[in-house]
Image (cartoon, grey):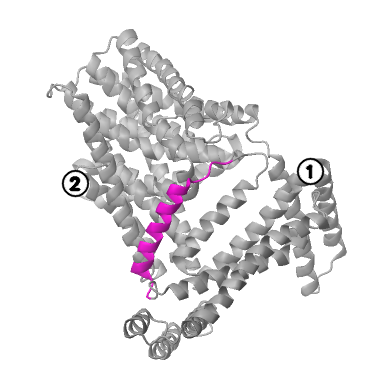
Amino acid sequence: MFAFIETPANSFAEVALVLAVFLAVAGLIVPIARRVRLPPTVLLILIGFGVSEFDQITNVVDFRLDDPVFNDIVIYVLLPTLIFSAAREMSTRLFLADITSILTLAIPAFVISMVIVAVGVWWLAGIAWASAFVFGALISATDPVAVVDTFKRVGVPSRLETLVQGESVMNDGIAITLYTVIVAIALGADAFELGTTIVDFVVVFAGGAAVGLVIGFGTALAFTRLGSTASAALTIGVAYGAYALADLWNVSGVIATLTAALVIGAATPTVATPKLRYRLDGVWDTLDFSFNAILFLLLGFEVNAELIKTHWLAIVIAIGVALVSRTFGVFPLLPIVSHFAKLPRVSGRYQAVLIWGGLRGGVAVALALALPDGVPGRDTIIAMTFGVVLSTLVINSTTIPYLIRWLGLDAPTRSDRASAGTMVVLAVRAARDAMSKYDLDVMRTGMQLDALESRARSDLSELDLDPSQASHLLRAYGLATERAAAQELIDANLLYGPLGRVLLYHLDADVEAMRFDEPQPVIHGGAVRMLLRLEIVLARLTTRSSRDRVLARYSIAQGRLITNEAAIDRLRDIDGLAGVTTELIGDATQRFELIRRYAAEDIDSLRAEHPLRFEQARQAQAWELSRLTAVRKIDAFEAWGMVSKKAAEMAREALDDVYDAQAPVADTTEMIRYRDEGREDE
């Protein structure tokens, strides 16, 4: 074991040294992995295994942790952070849109896989029934870290990535729950009762989700009150706090952390400032990289080569059974669920990647090493777990890029090619404008830009998009422009937060719907209504004017007016590209103009029906915009070094004194007074 685990003296220094070595190795391995075209996680586990075996021969330092220590590090230190990071990166909208397929993979497919593995190792390897089910439960949870890294490198459809990540973060919690129940049975607990087990499972699952919802919404509230550094630190506490609190209450810590991360991820675009969003990305990218590196190095250290040699036949059986079980857990279920749930079909190509990409990792090893000594066949279970984990990480993760290419999933779709070519032409235009602005019209650079634009236009002409596809491309560009404008309004506090979030959900869905060659699932109306209700609750807790319906109506109407005007202004940017004609631009303009006109009519209606509160709403927005602009200017002066930190703080305090003394009449308390005393003039 690690020396610092046993020896109190200098333990903290030794911990720091080991962590420093781990992180240094992880950082140095990335360029090597790129050169040899292997996932960094595979090299890390091989390095860990090699160092461990070298130490067994030389006995210089024993790197292997005690089994309980390894289990605690993985389950309570590494897993909460990795779950939170993976869930935070996922689109909540895409996750909810495909929740039926994800739950199918995470629950029934998991159970089918567990049963097949149990039957297989019982029949072929002679493992006791209860122990076989223990192995089935711990080995059926997927850990696609290496696969997701490959997805990002080679490029795969967003739906496939969502399915893989969603299944992984969900079935970790399910695996841990079932593992606990089955281990108790293997140790001679009371007779198994299916009904009681199902009820307990539902309670554990739902309880974890409830804990995560409360903590996630509480964190979103805190974002509106805290600075960016404090908020980023808070999210780290949330990852561990949600997990630990749920675990103390005997519900699923994994599901609690997952739910909290999804809620925070959904709320971040509208409750977090641009500075906080940037900081969160940096913090969690660093934590995700560091903790994954530590996990895979520890996995390599923990692999016991002697145990593998002794139980090699059982390992070979387990590897084959695990692959077969994964196949039967995926292929029969997803087509059936897609048909009855009216979802876009999960194609055979996607299913092949889901099967081959079902890697096993740290959770499986941690659960195997945590097995009590009284479980029959414990050493065999640990050996089989090591064998399956190593085979999937070394074989599956290194060959899946070839599978993706063979299936054509890395090939850009016609929609992607059209979007890419269009963006290249627009980028070249922006580059020329920048050169002219700074009087840098260099002939050589200009010729290179001409060649780049010519090649992009040639690629676009080869696509030969029909009018319908060109129309989809045009509308997607307009919708993306509208979404960018909406985010700017939200960041400026000019678009009512909760309604702004709902608007972003719809715009993202509309952009995805414009992909003419890759249909995407959409969130059902019931889920949208549920999200809207949650947004209203959040609004009442976070916004001083949340009960002012006039302010909300004005905010969303003004927002739609501005964002659709922005879209209309930019549609002509792609005139003549990818089959886009003046006639198509006219048709698309009419669609955006219709929404713009409705928004303008709503503003006129508000002005006529509620003149006083309409002006108060305008005053409130002017107050927010001027205050935010002034504060950001002071922040910029401080960042540029033009003023000292003390001077910037004094300037902010002066602004606060002025704005606090002249708060707009549209404040909630003032609105309530007008309503209650009946003094509104309309």
Is residue 578 found left or right of 516 in the rendered image?
Answer: right
Element marked by disc 1: loop
Q: Earlier in the sequence, mark 2 or mark 1?
A: 2
Q: Is residue 265 magenta?
A: no
| Above-or-below relation of 498 to 386 | below
Residue plotted at (72% across, 41% down) = 414
> Front-most of 271 and 147?
271
In the rendered image, residue 170, in percent from the top left (x then y), is placed at: 37, 38
Image quarter of the N terminus: top left
- The reply to whether residue 370 is visible in this rendering is no
Residue plotted at (19% across, 42% down) = 250
Q: Is residue 541 magenta?
A: yes
Counting other residues with Cα less than 10 Å from the Cα at mark 1, is it few (<14), some (14-19), or many (20 or more)?
A: some
In the rendered image, residue 208, in percent from the top left (x then y), is placed at: 28, 45
Disc sitting over residue 327 in the figure: none
Element marked by disc 2: loop
Is residue 575 found left or right of 557 in the rendered image?
Answer: right
Residue plotted at (82% across, 61% down) = 445
Counting other residues with Cα less than 10 Å from the Cα at mark 2, is it few (<14), some (14-19), or many (20 or more)?
A: few
Q: Nearer the viewer, mark 2 or mark 1?
A: 1
Residue under circle 1?
465
Residue under circle 2?
249
| Above-or-below relation of 387 to 147 | above
> Front-most of 151 and 389?
151
Question: What type is the residue that disc 2 sits on?
Answer: Trp
- The reply to whether residue 540 is visible in this rendering is yes
Q: Which residues are magenta?
A: 520-544
In the rendered image, residue 94, in percent from the top left (x then y), is placed at: 50, 46
| Above-or-below relation of 577 to 58 | below
Question: What type is the residue that disc 1 sits on?
Answer: Leu
